[in-house]
C-alpha cells in the first residue's frame, strides 16, 4: 500500500437492501424495504410502455443486455435527446442507471484504453478523481453473482492498453509529489472518503476515454479524450461491500476531475448536467450541457482550499410553515439520502411531525427516525410540502422526500419515513431530494441550475 497525504473527498451512502421488522401498537410486520425507485425495472417497463416483460426475449435482469435493452426502449420510444448536440456523453449513450443493490447510486458504463475496457462506474459530484480497479492487490470481487448481476465486472490494466501512459511526479496533477523519490517516478494517489474506513489507493495514469457527441444516438461523432485517472490497486471500506465495486467517477471542481480536464482541453464547455427521474431508474448525463435558459439557479459557495458544490439555503418551508433557519449543504450525487445537521434537521423534522397525522412507528435497523404507519385503506395523511429557498431567491420544492415500505406477503404499503438523516457535522443534499430535476453544474459561472424534468423530453 502506498503512503501519502490523504485527499479528502465528500462521499457517503446508505445501503437499505434489508428485511426488517416494524413495530406499531404491539403488532409486528415482516417487511421488505423499497426505495421509491427500486421496483423491478421489468415491471416498470411493462406498465409504462406495454412491453411484454415476461417474454422469452426479455434479457435476464442484471445482465449487460438487460441495461442495454432499457436504453434501446428509451431511445425508440422518445426519439429525442434531453440535451443538445454541443455536448459529449458516454460512448454507450447519455443514460445512467440507478441500481438499488449497489447502494441506490447512479451508474454508467465507460470505455477506457486501447483496446477498451468497459467499466460500470458510480457517478459522484462529492469527489474529484475517476478511479477504476486496476492491477488489483485488494479490490472488490469482479463476479457479477456477488451483486446480482449476470455479467463479470472488468478491470483496467495499463499494460494491456496501447494508449496508456504513467503520470509522473512532476505533473501538475500529482498532489503527492512530496512522497516521490524522483520526479520521474509514477505519481501515487490516496483518496479517503467520509464513509468509515473507505479509501482508494494506487497510481495515476493517462489513457483514452471514449465519448460521443450529443446523446449517443443518431450516429454521433466518437471522441477519444486523453484523461488522467486513478489505477486503483487497493480499496477499503464500502468499496469492498458493494458500493462502486467497479470504480467511481468523481465530478468535482478540482483540476483532476474529468469535467475539468475535458473543458481545459477544449472538448466541451465547463459544465455538465444530470437528470434524476421521478419514475423509473434511468437518468441522463451530459458533459458541456448548460441547460435551458429558464432554469432556476443559485451560486456555489466555493472554499478555495478544497472547492466543492456547496450551496446556501436561506430558509425553507414545511407545509405553509416558513422556517428562517439558514444553512449550507453539499449537493452530492454520491449520497443516496439527505443528511442535515442541527438546527436545520431539528426544525424540519419537528415541523414535519407536527403536520403528519399518521401513527408513529419504529423501523429496526433503519437510519430514519421519523416513520409512520399506513392504514388498511392504503391512505396516508396529507404530507406537507418541503421546499428549500436558496440564496439568490430560487425555490427548490422537494418532489419526493419519503421512502415507502411494503409488506413482503401482501405487497401493500404499510409505512413510510421522511428520508432525512441526522448529521453531526456537514449537511448534504442527497439523491432523494434531487428526484424529478435536471441539475446543471455550471462550473464556469459557478452556479447550480435546476428545472423539473421527466428526463425524456426536456430540451
Image (spheres, rainbow, N blue to C red):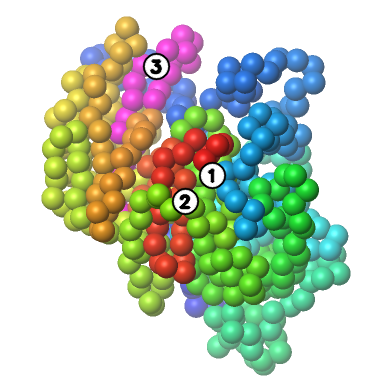
Judging from the image, what secondary structure is the residue with disc 1 in?
loop
* Image-quadrant location for residue 181: bottom right
Instruction: Point out residue 294 in the picture as x, y percentages from the top left corner.
Output: 40, 49
Q: Is residue 336 visible?
A: no
Instruction: Point out residue 358 in the picture as x, y percentages from the top left corner.
Output: 22, 19
Query: Along the polypeptide, which appears first: circle 3 or circle 1?
Result: 3
Name the residue beneath numbered marker 1. Answer: 459
Tell me the mark number nearer the camera, choosing from 3 and 1.
Answer: 1
Judging from the image, what secondary structure is the residue with disc 2 in?
loop
Q: How many marks?
A: 3
Label 3, label 2: how many angstroms apart (C-alpha)? 37 Å
Name the residue beneath numbered marker 2. Answer: 292
Residue reaching furthest to the top = 377
User: Image height check: is 56 above or below 129?
Assistant: above
Q: Which mark, residue 413?
A: 3
The quadrant of the image that shows the N terminus is bottom right
Q: Residue at x 56, y 52 (%)?
A: 123
Mark 1 and mark 2 in contact? Answer it, CB < 8 Å. yes
Amino acid at each position: 500500500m502506498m503512503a501519502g497525504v490523504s485527499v479528502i473527498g465528500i462521499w457517503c451512502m446508505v445501503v437499505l437492501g434489508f428485511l426488517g421488522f416494524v413495530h406499531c401498537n404491539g403488532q409486528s410486520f415482516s417487511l421488505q424495504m423499497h426505495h421509491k425507485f427500486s421496483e423491478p425495472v421489468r415491471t416498470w417497463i411493462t406498465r409504462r410502455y406495454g412491453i411484454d416483460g415476461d417474454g422469452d426475449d426479455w434479457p435476464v435482469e442484471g445482465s449487460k443486455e438487460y441495461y442495454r435493452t432499457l436504453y434501446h426502449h428509451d431511445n425508440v420510444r422518445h426519439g429525442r435527446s434531453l440535451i443538445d448536440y454541443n455536448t459529449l456523453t458516454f460512448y454507450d449513450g447519455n443514460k445512467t442507471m440507478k441500481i438499488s443493490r449497489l447502494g441506490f447510486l447512479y451508474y454508467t458504463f465507460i470505455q477506457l484504453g486501447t483496446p477498451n475496457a468497459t467499466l460500470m462506474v458510480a457517478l459522484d459530484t462529492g469527489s474529484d478523481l475517476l478511479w477504476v480497479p486496476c492491477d488489483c492487490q485488494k479490490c472488490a470481487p469482479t463476479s457479477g453473482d456477488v451483486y446480482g448481476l449476470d455479467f463479470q465486472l472488468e478491470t483496467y490494466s495499463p499494460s494491456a492498453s496501447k494508449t496508456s501512459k504513467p503520470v509522473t511526479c512532476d505533473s501538475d496533477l500529482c498532489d503527492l509529489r512530496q512522497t516521490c523519490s524522483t520526479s520521474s517516478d509514477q505519481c501515487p494517489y490516496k483518496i479517503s472518503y467520509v464513509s468509515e474506513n473507505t479509501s482508494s489507493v494506487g497510481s495515476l495514469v493517462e489513457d483514452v476515454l471514449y465519448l460521443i457527441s450529443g446523446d449517443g444516438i443518431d450516429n454521433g461523432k466518437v471522441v477519444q479524450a486523453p484523461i488522467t485517472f486513478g489505477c486503483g490497486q487497493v480499496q477499503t471500506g464500502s468499496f469492498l461491500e458493494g458500493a462502486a465495486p467497479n470504480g467511481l467517477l468523481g465530478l468535482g471542481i478540482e483540476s483532476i476531475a474529468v469535467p475539468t480536464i475535458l473543458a481545459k482541453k477544449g472538448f466541451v464547455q465547463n459544465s455538465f448536467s444530470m437528470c434524476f427521474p421521478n419514475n423509473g431508474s434511468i437518468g441522463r448525463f451530459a458533459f458541456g450541457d448548460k441547460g435551458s435558459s429558464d432554469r432556476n439557479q443559485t451560486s456555489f459557495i466555493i472554499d478555495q482550499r478544497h472547492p466543492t458544490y456547496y450551496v446556501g439555503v436561506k430558509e425553507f418551508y414545511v407545509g405553509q410553515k416558513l422556517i428562517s433557519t439558514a444553512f449550507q449543504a453539499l449537493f452530492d450525487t454520491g449520497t443516496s439520502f439527505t443528511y442535515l445537521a442541527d438546527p436545520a434537521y431539528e426544525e424540519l423534522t419537528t415541523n414535519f411531525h407536527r403536520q403528519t397525522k399518521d401513527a408513529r412507528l419504529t423501523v429496526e435497523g433503519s437510519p430514519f427516525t421519523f416513520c409512520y404507519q399506513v392504514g388498511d385503506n392504503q391512505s396516508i395523511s396529507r404530507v406537507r410540502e418541503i421546499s428549500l429557498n436558496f440564496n439568490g431567491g430560487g425555490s427548490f420544492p422537494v418532489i419526493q422526500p419519503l421512502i415507502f415500505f411494503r409488506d413482503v406477503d401482501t405487497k401493500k404499503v404499510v409505512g413510510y419515513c421522511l428520508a432525512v438523516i441526522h448529521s453531526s457535522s456537514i449537511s448534504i443534499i442527497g439523491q432523494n431530494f434531487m428526484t424529478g430535476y435536471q441539475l446543471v453544474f455550471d462550473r464556469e459561472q459557478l452556479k447550480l441550475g435546476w428545472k423539473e424534468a421527466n428526463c425524456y423530453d426536456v430540451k
